[in-house]
Amino acid sequence: MCGRFALTVSPEEVRELLGLLELEDFPARYNIAPTQPILVVIAGEGQDRGSNLPDRRALLVRWGLTPSWVKDPKEFPLLINARAETAIGKASFRAAMRHRRVLVPASGFYEWHRPAKETGEKPQAYWVRPRGGGIIAFAGLMETWSSSDGSEVDTGAIMTTKANRSMSSIHERMPVVIKPEDFSRWLDCKTQEPREVADLLVPAEEDFFEMIAVSDRVNKVANMGPDLQEPVVVERPPKPPRKPDPDDGQLSFL
């Protein structure tokens, strides 16, 4: 699952990596939450033949996808994530997978490790980012919902997949990361059908991310500063004392 993420790099870095001709300035965002606007990148309409200018554009959508066929969004669940394993066949995502695939630029994401109660461990938040920092692009889906009065709302979701081995120590799911060399294929909804890009919906390589324990302040939307990513020491519950073993060499008076 991906329930919070951050985009803290400069607009110039986003424009360069994603191949955008134009991108308005935006502030660093350290705690992007569901229902808030998120930046997405879509394929352009096509340049003139022979042009080498970028052919992608960026726009803001509400994080929480609403399919076009929904009558009342208030009575429909907030779809912030789409499972890669089932999105092709699921009614909520089928049209978006075929016609409206997008990229979601990010600096990383937050995830909660929630141990079983019997372990005695407390839930712990982690800041998950590429090793060495930088910018990545999540696989995303977009839908435009139209109300009865004619107004429209652009909405989006981030695709997730089964966690790789290192990430699974924290959570069973993780966002799908699209590599730069695959941007065009993922965004190409004209010639690339969903089944032809299914091979991109896989976990990131084992050493791609680093996981940094952070405070639980990230859980509150009002907290938006860079301090959210400062490392903290993970507290482990004390282990119960080991019971003496009669055969471990200790004297017994029984």
Image: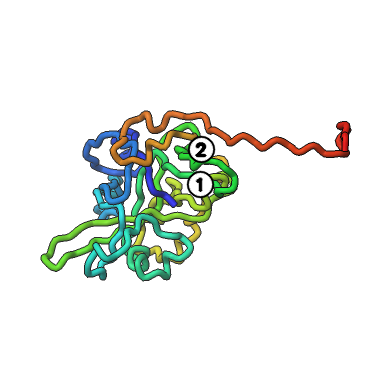
* Of residues 24 and 183, the one drawn nearer to the viewer in this rendering: 24
Q: Quadrant of residue 96?
A: bottom left
| Lateral position of residue 243 relative to residue 87, left or right | right
Residue 114: image tag = 1
Expressed as whole percent of the image width and height from the top left, the position of residue 137 reads: 39, 46
Q: Which residue is mark 2?
A: 211
Task: Give how far across and how far down residue 234 sits, in percent.
Answer: 53, 33
Q: Are marks 2 and 1 in contact (CB under 8 Å)?
A: no
> Total of numbered circles in the picture?
2
Residue type of the residue flagged with mark 1: Arg
Query: Is 63 situated above or below 23?
Result: below
**Mark 2 or mark 1, which has the lower sequence index?**
1
Residue 242: tell me if it is visible: yes
Q: In the rendered view, tell whether residue 225 sits above or below residue 15.
A: above
Q: Which mark is residue 67?
A: none
Q: Gap between marks 2 and 1, in whole Å? A: 15 Å
Query: Where is residue 207 shown, x and y percent of the image?
Result: 56, 40
Q: In percent of the image, x 14 and y 68: which residue is there?
A: 148
Q: Which quadrant of the view contains residue 218?
A: top left
Residue at 35% x, 30% y: name it.
226
